[in-house]
Amino acid sequence: MSDWLGPTEWEALALSTKVALWSVSVSLGPAIAIAWVLARHDFPGRGLLNALVHLPLVMPPVVTGYLLLIALGTQGPVGGFLSDSFGITFAFQWTGAVVAAAVMGFPLMVRAIRLSIEAVDPRLEEAARTLGANGVLVFATVTLPQILPGLIAGAVLSFAKGLGEFGATITFVSNIPGETRTLSIAIHSLLQTPQGDAAAIRLTLVAIALSVAALLVSEVMARRAGNRIRGMAS
Amino acid sequence: MSAQLDIDIEKRLGAQMALQVRFQAGAGVTALFGRSGAGKTSVVQMIAGLMRPDRGRIAVGERVLFDSAQGIDLPVHRRRVGYVFQDARLFPHLSVRRNLLYAQTVARRRGQLKLAPVCDLLGITDLLDRPPGALSGGETQRVAIGRALLSDPSILLMDEPLASLDGPRKGEILPFLDRLKDETGLPIVYVSHAMEEVIRLADTMVLIDEGRVAAQGPVEEVTSRLDLRPLTGRYEAGAVVPARIAAHDEVYELTRLDIAGGGALMVPRIHQPLGTALRVRLRARDVTLSLTRPEGASPLNILEGTVRERAAPEGAFVDVLVDAGVPIWARVTRLSADTLDLQPGKPIFAIVKAGAIDRASLGRAR
């Protein structure tokens, strides 16, 4: 297998996986928070927040990437501040690819989690409160276990999205081998080179395998979690 | 006896209904009785803090849970109420054991009660390692009661805990509730619209009708009141009489009950020790009246008294309230009532069918 893929192809594969995993990890917390707010609270501006979260899903990815570049580039308002104050830069860094993947996967994640929060029986949460659990404990011990299948589904969707992200990533952080050349960008680059077809096909097969594997893993995990919350023996 | 629960609250529930409830409850079981939609559940939800009154005060013992005047509104998790929901609400992702220990492990609430004796009391020791999905309805409700008990509550709120169960399952739980009341000493608020449960379990009764307290007092008193008949139910018409087991007759398998007011009843053998205090429910249709002591009839179960009141006639029948030391209802035909000239003050003999008293009509008094 290691001979089958060349070193640059391995590099692209490893980078993509790293970027996708990081993007899932950093967006999980905010996604739960926003899904919670959207599912449980009614406030002025709720529709706006919902639209904002879903924007990356409906906008052309290149537009999202361009907006990220404007906002988070070293000359941008947010990016300039982060760079000057903390020395954090995203432009042309793999961390920028993480941001692009996280933003693109965010609506998918929020959607899945929000649906599962809406399906949680609030009567169980009431019961936990009467037993002495405060809000945080109720969430951690009753809500969270109940939404686990949705959480897994959301995380896998976002992971898959991050693995394959192309438009926003290449616009935001360009195509730097070893730094921002992820799987999709590598395939695209290979197709531009004269003898790249074979390698492109190999990477395509890898991409398919990874996607199918992610789907299978999420199915199994979601089913286990589902059985558990229905009170069956797992 | 000092009041364990002191409640005086107002709450608007939609356009049609305003809840205005005020009562005090001592130790033992206080039944909130009334039709569906009368506002009973809202009252317990407000005690638990799951619903907020518009105005008023709720205190359990010395602890004020809610006081709109003083701006006190303890959050649910700090109220120390053991709430047994009609639908049990066990956590499906936790085993029975972890459900029972939820309050102790998650909320770090530890009271006097320990897991083992509570499981003994409720007969759920064998279920500990099962998931809640594998329990029967009766088992589920017993586990829910155990879970509430183990949360170190200062009061137990039971919202129709038997309503979702069929007859045999109810019978399975009632003895546990009897023991609960005897052994824990917690004040219990028991919401129900089933008179048999109230008579079996409750000491005090608060009758709720359209969001208001229509009557409150000892169960015996409230159930015997004529003006409350439309609320306590026509088919359930009857009186509840305090009694004590005076003797057992092993040969004929009978038990003699001395009832308050001086009379005695012979009923089928009750397997309880001598001296046990009981409440006996005498349905009006199981009691007939006679002007003279019946001759030739079995001398058992004849109570002497005077006519106190006549209810409004219903078809061919009329119910008559007799003062036999304790109030007793008798159902006679209107014809008999007129023939016997049953006017208030008239001396009368009330004849109670021995077969009328069965397990379902007995409750344990405190």
Image: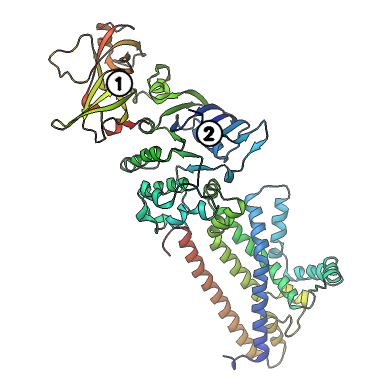
Q: Which mark is residue A66?
A: none
> Residue B13: in sight, yes or no?
no
Q: Position of residue B87 (x, y in %)?
A: 45, 45
Element class at badge 2: helix
For label 1, the residue is B284
The residue at 82%/68% (across/down) is A82
Q: Is residue A219 left or right of residue A163?
A: left
- In this rendering, the answer to whether A196 lies above or below B266 is below
Q: Chain of mark 1?
A: B
Label 2, on which residue? B43
- Along the viewing direction, whichever of B241 and A180 lies nearer the viewer: B241
Choose top left, top right, bottom left or bottom right for residue B312. top left
Colour setup of the view: rainbow
Whether residue B111 sits left or right of residue B182 in the image: it is: right
Residue at mark 2 shares a chain with residue at mark 1: yes
Q: Position of residue B189 (x, y in %)?
A: 47, 35
10 Å crowding of disc 2: few (<14), some (14-19), many (20+): many
Of the residues shown, which amino acid type is indicated by label 2? Val
Would residue B329 be seen by someone viewing this image from the given angle? yes
